[in-house]
Image (cartoon, rainbow, N blue to C red):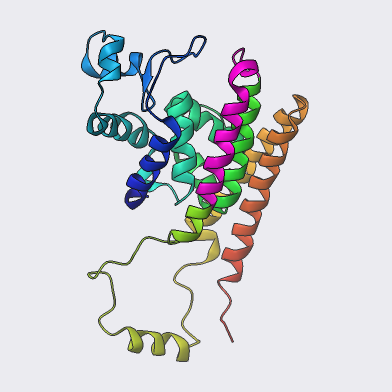
């Protein structure tokens, strides 16, 4: 969510700390989580370790927004999931973070946050996606050569971020706030009309709903992901794919039920 960027950035800064250049760390010289390679790419030239050390917080914040937050569509993600995916992007790059998310959702894994991935996000509770994303991250990191040395720190960080992200879901609105222009002129009168006139038909039949067809797409792609995970003996991936399937089924059931008048 757009309004969560500063909160999420503060969590990243807290996790990353200051300057570090640990032997064996794949990132090399790093300050506030910004690696020497990243800073070199941003400035368009190779920078020294001293320049990394002198990096200022404002420039780091701009890099985080442009290169990571915007790259994962952080403004449009549900509250909580925005933090979890942002942290993954900072650790492993935006494209890999999206791939982790797609593994968690059981959809096609291409590293692109397209319509099917967004539809899968929409039909599941953010907290469920956050947990599944954490499992996908851990499963990938375990296979890295550096895990033997840094794995404990990596997994502990994922756990901390996951806890903060799930807390953030409870503080974030489920829907976008209504603007003044979109608000009915007389809310009480509008509510009274809706409650008393039970013969008003649904605005469109359930089979014309975008939610229905998006959910079918999620179910289809998730079943494929479940089959692949089963063949690969990926229990975590199989469970996440089944969760996505159930989420799609529940979304369809809820949409069908919504066509019935409330008595």
Image: 32 above or below 12:
above
Relative vertical location of residue 247 with respect to residue 200 in this rendering, above or below: above
Q: Residue at x 66, y 33 (%)?
A: 225
Percent of width and height locating residue 127: 57, 51
Residue 66: x percent and y percent?
29, 32
Asked if residue 230 is positioned above or below residue 6 in the image, the reply reads above
Q: Where residue 249 appears, x then y in whole percent?
A: 65, 54
Front residue of this view, candidates 175 and 196: 175
Q: Nearer the viewer, residue 29 or 243?
A: 29
Q: How many marks?
A: 0
Instruction: Tell me the residue at 47%/14% (across/down).
Output: 22
* Residue 8 position by quadrant: top left
Position of residue 144 measured from the top left corner of the image (x, y, whole percent): 61, 16
Q: Which residues are magenta?
A: 143-166
Question: Which image quarter: residue 190?
Answer: bottom left
Any magenta on residue 151? yes
Q: Residue at x 47, y 53 (%)?
A: 168
Q: Is residue 81 visible?
A: yes
Residue at coordinates 55% horizontally, 60% vertically from top-left? 207
Magenta stretch, main secondary structure, is: helix
Q: Quadrant of the C terminus?
A: bottom right
Is there any visible trace of residue 105 in the rendered image? no
Residue nearest the observer in this picture, 159 or 123: 159
Residue 105 belongs to the span the image colors magenta: no
């Amino acid at each position: 969510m757009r309004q969560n960027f500063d909160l999420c950035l503060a969590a990243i800064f807290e996790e990353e700390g200051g300057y570090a250049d640990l032997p064996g760390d794949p990132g090399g010289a790093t300050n506030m989580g910004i690696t020497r390679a990243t800073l070199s790419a941003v400035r368009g030239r190779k920078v020294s370790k001293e320049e990394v050390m002198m990096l200022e917080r404002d420039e780091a914040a701009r890099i985080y927004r442009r290169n990571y937050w915007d790259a994962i569509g952080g403004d449009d993600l549900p509250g909580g999931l925005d933090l979890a995916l942002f942290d993954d992007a900072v650790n492993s790059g935006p494209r890999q973070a999206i791939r982790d998310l797609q593994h968690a959702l059981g959809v096609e894994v291409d590293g692109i946050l397209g319509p099917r991935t967004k539809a899968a996000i929409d039909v599941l509770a953010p907290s469920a996606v956050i947990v599944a994303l954490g499992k996908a991250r851990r499963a990938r990191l375990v296979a890295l050569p550096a895990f033997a040395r840094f794995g404990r720190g990596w997994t502990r960080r994922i756990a901390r971020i996951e806890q903060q992200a799930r807390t953030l879901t409870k503080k974030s609105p489920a829907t976008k706030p209504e603007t003044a222009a979109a608000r009915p002129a007389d809310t009480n009168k509008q509510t009274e009309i809706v409650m008393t006139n039970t013969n008003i038909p649904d605005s469109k039949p359930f089979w014309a709903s975008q939610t229905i067809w998006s959910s079918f797409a999620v179910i289809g792609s998730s079943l494929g992901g479940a089959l692949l995970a089963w063949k690969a003996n990926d229990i975590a991936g199989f469970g996440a794919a089944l969760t996505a399937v159930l989420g799609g089924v529940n979304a369809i059931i809820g949409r069908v039920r919504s066509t019935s008048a409330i008595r």
